[in-house]
Image: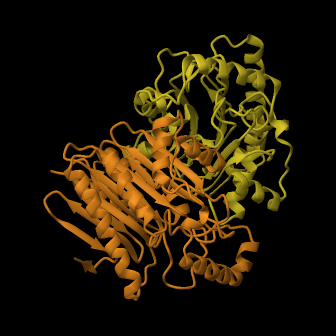
């Protein structure tokens, strides 16, 4: 064992009726991002640099729900969030509520490297972005016609299925309960935009890093923060591993999912795949989610309990795989 | 076994020469809030209601860094945040960036119960507050003269520090801006409670870090960092936000109990004394069995606890016991 390893994801909870062409496009994007990460690793880039680079690529491409192509809030706008964590000293940076920053993951990195804080949000984060001189654009840049259409469908579905202003039983209000497997986070899977993109890497020196970025839940309330910017929930990296999660944000937060993988490795001595399987099986209850992970030994693993997860992984010994379904 | 409750009003570098008029009102306040919690538990109120009630009280008291009495951002404003978690169901709620909501912890509870989300922040949270009809006031309500003064001193101290901020921060501990005087309005407020059936809950609330950048979020609203509760224990942490986030402090106490079979005290001591840098964290925790622990690696932590067998205590430093 040993050597580098990388995994990427484009979100969990995939419409089983996704047209084959879309599936092909997704797989090509995942492969392209993997290859980008791999060439970086070949030139001895550190894990933290590679995860940022790869997530920037995923944000820039409109296919997945992050950066351009982000899901829309109830107001039809985009509010993006991201977090990044560097395993060796567990340094971290996170951002939420971004509306003009072209690459949220890079701003999260700047929060980590250039600010005295770990997490900046909304107008404070936007101000920081301008101070740092990162690339900013109009909010419209992030909005795709496809997502405008999806938002409309989501609103229609919501009025029939789910009015959260009416008090309901506990399992419903947190989006964790589903009557049928074809709903994610309260939305029919055909309009659900699998939340989040992510990348985890262990480099040749055994350093792990993780990065996650998203536009969030389609039709979310403005101001809603999901799991992606929360260290321990959507993203985590330490000496042992790097983890990035995707799926029902509320379930991931409640289950502190990313931290959980590391905790069972550290406190129960489980190996990477065992830890991933354990967490997916035991920590989600009625929630649906997936995750990718790497270990400091050069291993890579992933798991999900929902209908599909866009993912790809590769290791130094030449292994490479891209997939969507089980 | 029986009920147990603990409260805190922040951990940090609390000088032992804290003047009496700075010390006494806070000890009184902790006693008062503890008493409210005790009476609530004795009348069989669920722990989730108890922690909300007690933290509301702490928010309303201007001596602590939450609600009224919150420290100020670099712009002289308040941005408050809070979270709450129910151990049985593991439902949780969190809010950040509040400027007009009198009780952040109650809004966090409403997010948990009345939305499909867990966490709302800034304008979206303020809008939700108005939709829910919670009590809102002009921001000036939260600002105290002491905190205006603290901000002034912090900015002055920062001017001396300015060279440090010009370089990228390479070290692993964020250099938090120091307060020039010893009476820093540190941390956070929090409450954890367990009833005689083993139901657990935790809640934490804060104004954040003095002179923080607008938009800065700390550990308090981050589930697993500042607040956590499951079927084993309930934890509320306070101290240097960035360290608590990185250390997933509240979750780690529970994880050590679950995965390594440590007791509540062993788990808390491990997290505080072995896994987090000295001078950065304090926490209060209760277990399903009715145990209480209050652990800190800072100079002091404003705290108190009470158990059904009649024992209660309010303290600041480790050996200074206050009746």
Q: Which chain is orange?
A: B
The residue located at (28%, 57%) in the rendering is B37
Q: Residue at horizontal 60%, vertical 43%?
A: A225
Residue sitting nearer the eye, B280 or A35: B280
Where residue B67 appears, as percent x and y from the top left, is 50, 62
* Residue B224 in sight from this viewpoint: no
Residue at 41% across / 82% down in the picture?
A: B22
Pick the front one: B126 or A192: B126
Q: Residue at x 86, y 45 (%)?
A: A137
Q: Position of residue B202 (x, y in %)?
A: 37, 51
- B86 vs B8: above or below: above
What shade does chain A have? yellow
- Asked which quadrant contains residue A65, the reply is top right
x then y, percent, for residue A66: 72, 36
Task: Name the colour scheme.
Answer: by chain
Q: Nearer the viewer, residue A317 or A85?
A: A85
> Quick one: A273 or A225, which is closer to the camera?
A225
Q: Is residue B49 left or right of residue B160?
A: left
Is residue A290 depicted above or below B20 in this figure? above
């Amino acid at each position: 064992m040993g050597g580098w390893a990388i995994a990427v994801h484009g979100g969990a909870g995939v419409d089983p009726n996704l047209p084959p062409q879309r599936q092909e496009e997704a797989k090509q994007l995942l492969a392209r991002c993997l290859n980008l990460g791999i060439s970086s690793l070949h030139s001895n880039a550190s894990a933290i640099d590679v995860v940022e680079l790869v997530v920037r690529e995923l944000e820039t491409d409109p296919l997945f729900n992050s950066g351009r192509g982000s899901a829309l809030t109830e107001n039809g706008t985009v509010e993006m969030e991201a977090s990044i964590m560097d395993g060796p000293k567990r340094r971290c940076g996170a951002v939420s509520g971004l509306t003009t920053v072209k690459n949220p993951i890079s701003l999260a990195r700047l929060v980590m490297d250039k600010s005295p804080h770990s997490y900046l949000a909304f107008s404070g984060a936007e101000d920081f972005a301008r101070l740092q001189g990162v690339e900013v654009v109009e909010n419209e840049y992030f909005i795709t016609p496809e997502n405008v259409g999806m938002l409309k469908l989501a609103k229609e579905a919501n009025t029939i299925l789910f009015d959260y202003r009416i008090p309901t039983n506990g399992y419903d209000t947190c989006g964790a309960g589903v009557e049928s497997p074809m709903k994610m986070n309260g939305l029919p899977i055909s309009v659900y935009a699998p939340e989040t993109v992510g990348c985890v890497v262990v480099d040749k020196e055994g350093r792990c890093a993780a990065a996650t970025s998203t536009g969030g839940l389609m039709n979310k309330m403005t101001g809603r923060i999901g799991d992606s910017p929360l260290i321990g929930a959507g993203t985590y990296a330490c000496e042992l591993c790097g983890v990035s999660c995707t799926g029902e944000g509320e379930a991931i937060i409640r289950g502190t999912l990313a931290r959980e993988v590391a905790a069972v490795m550290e406190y129960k001595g489980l190996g990477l795949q065992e830890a991933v399987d354990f967490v997916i099986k035991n920590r989600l209850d009625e929630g649906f989610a997936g995750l990718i992970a790497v270990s400091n030994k050069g291993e890579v693993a992933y798991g999900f309990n929902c209908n599909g997860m866009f993912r790809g992984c590769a290791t130094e010994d030449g292994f490479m795989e891209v997939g969507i379904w089980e | 076994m029986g009920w147990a409750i603990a409260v805190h009003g922040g951990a940090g570098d609390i000088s032992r020469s804290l003047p009496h008029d700075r010390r006494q009102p806070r000890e009184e306040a902790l006693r008062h809030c503890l008493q409210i919690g005790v009476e609530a538990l004795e009348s069989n109120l669920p722990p989730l209601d108890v922690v909300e009630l007690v933290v509301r009280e702490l928010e309303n008291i201007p001596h602590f860094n939450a609600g009224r009495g919150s420290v100020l951002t670099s712009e002289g404003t308040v941005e408050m945040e809070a979270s709450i978690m129910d151990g049985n169901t593991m439902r949780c709620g969190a809010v950040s960036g509040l400027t007009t909501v009198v009780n952040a912890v109650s809004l966090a509870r409403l997010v948990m119960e009345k939305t499909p989300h867990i966490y709302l922040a800034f304008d979206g949270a303020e809008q939700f507050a108005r939709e829910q009809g919670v009590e809102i006031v002009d921001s000036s309500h939260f600002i105290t003269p002491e905190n205006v003064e603290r901000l002034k001193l912090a900015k002055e101290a920062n001017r001396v520090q300015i060279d440090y901020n010009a370089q990228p921060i390479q070290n692993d501990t964020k250099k938090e801006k120091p307060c020039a005087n010893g009476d820093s309005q540190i941390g956070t407020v929090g409450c954890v409670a367990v009833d005689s059936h083993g139901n657990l809950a935790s809640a934490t609330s804060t104004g954040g870090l003095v002179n923080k950048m607008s938009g800065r979020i700390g550990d308090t609203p981050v589930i697993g960092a500042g607040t956590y509760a499951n079927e084993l224990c309930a934890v509320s942490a306070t101290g240097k936000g960035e360290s608590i986030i990185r250390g997933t402090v509240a979750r780690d106490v529970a994880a050590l109990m679950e995965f390594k079979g440590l007791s509540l005290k062993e788990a808390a001591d491990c997290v505080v004394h072995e896994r987090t840098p000295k001078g950065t964290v304090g926490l209060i925790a209760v277990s399903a069995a009715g145990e209480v622990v209050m652990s800190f690696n800072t100079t002091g932590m404003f705290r108190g606890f009470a158990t059904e067998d009649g024992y209660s205590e309010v303290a600041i430093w480790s050996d200074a016991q206050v009746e």
